[in-house]
Amino acid sequence: MKNLLFGIALMLAAAPGAFAQVSVKEPWVRATVPAQPVSGAYMLLTAARNARLVQVRSPVAGTAEIHESILVDNIMKMRAVAAVDLPAGRAVELKPGGYHVMLLDLKRQLKAGETVPITLVFEGPDRKRTSLEVMAPVRPIAGMPAGDHSHK
Amino acid sequence: MRGFVLTGFLAAFALLLPACSPAGPKFNGIDVTGASFGRDFRLTDPDGRERTLSEFRGRYVMLFFGYIHCPDVCPTSLARAAEVRKALGAEGKRLQVIFVTVDPERDTPQLMRAYTEAFDPSFLGLRSDPEGTRKVAEEFRTFYQKAQGQGTYTVDHSAFTYVYDDQSRLRLMLRYDQSAEQCLADLRALMRAGA
């Protein structure tokens, strides 16, 4: 399943042409409970050439932002960031407790097992932008991906 | 600012305690036995009933602060607590997990119930009005502060989990970066040591 999604992401990434082949592995979104207006989406991004993730959107969310959670002296802070740098060839992980796609003003409950489209907009050093749609499976709210899932 | 005071305070505790109690069990978390904070709370459950810490006497309690608009870190803490409770097996019945919101304006009773139950039906979500929340945070020497973003706000907050023994005495502070296994080991050590 994961490989299939990876394949789709690659195909879509390749479609816009020469620039910014960014591979997206293991995208997922955390399920929500009824009336919960926010959720987070995670994935592993690897850009073939230097790029930045500059924008995110999803039809299930009124607004989507790129956020970063930071732990400072055991105080957790979460802030919107303008972009995430994707240095060529280096895998950058969007994961709980770090960078994530923040889905705000959710239009409906996200249920485990369904799939949510998320559009990622990348910008190359030449400022050219390309977008890539990934299909992110929704994982159970209490799913424990945090148990350090480190990809080198 | 208060957060820094707390951190300093805990650091002092961490330095002092090993010297005072060489015979006690070793914990991954910070041993705060004898602490003069976090002694009790007066909060409201989703049914509108007032709850206090002392009513959980006879059970162990893991309590932490957070908010539902934090879709990133707070579910991780809740999921960790659910994992610990499950791993305790039959002993898990002796553990009550309590989630206290630092964002009472947005975290309604209905939302609190649905949210905590999604992790474990036994979990309890408690809230107060903004003034009551401030008082509880003060008693627990926990830090929280709104941070305005574009259109919406986030809440910076301390990420400690408070652990109480079955006599409702605060014993441990678990750090955010402790794994479920490390938290589990601490709970087991505490339960083994008895009251």
Image (cartoon, rainbow, N blue to C red):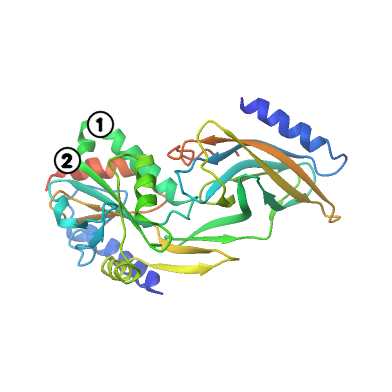
- Horizontal relation, residue B157 to residue A15: left or right: left
With respect to residue B37, does B44 lie above or below?
A: above
* B67, B94: nearer the viewer: B67
Residue appearing at x 22%, y 43% in the figure? B95
Tell me the kind of residue under disc 1. Answer: Gly
Mark 2 lies on residue: B192
Tell which tag, 2 or 1, sits nearer the viewer: 1
Q: Earlier in the sequence, mark 2 or mark 1?
A: 1
Residue appearing at x 60%, y 46% in the figure? A94
* A91, B145: nearer the viewer: B145
- Horizontal relation, residue B95 to residue B83: left or right: left
* A52, B98: nearer the viewer: B98
Query: Are circles 2 and 1 on residues that touch, CB within 8 Å?
Result: no
Q: Residues within 10 Å of mark 2 (few under 14, many from 20)?
A: few
- Which residue extends farthest bottom? B1
The chain letter for the residue carrying disc 1 is B
Residue B160 visible (yes or no)? no
Mark 1 lies on residue: B89
With respect to residue B143, does A46 lie above or below?
A: above
**Picture coordinates of residue B28 (x, y %)?**
32, 48
The chain letter for the residue carrying disc 2 is B
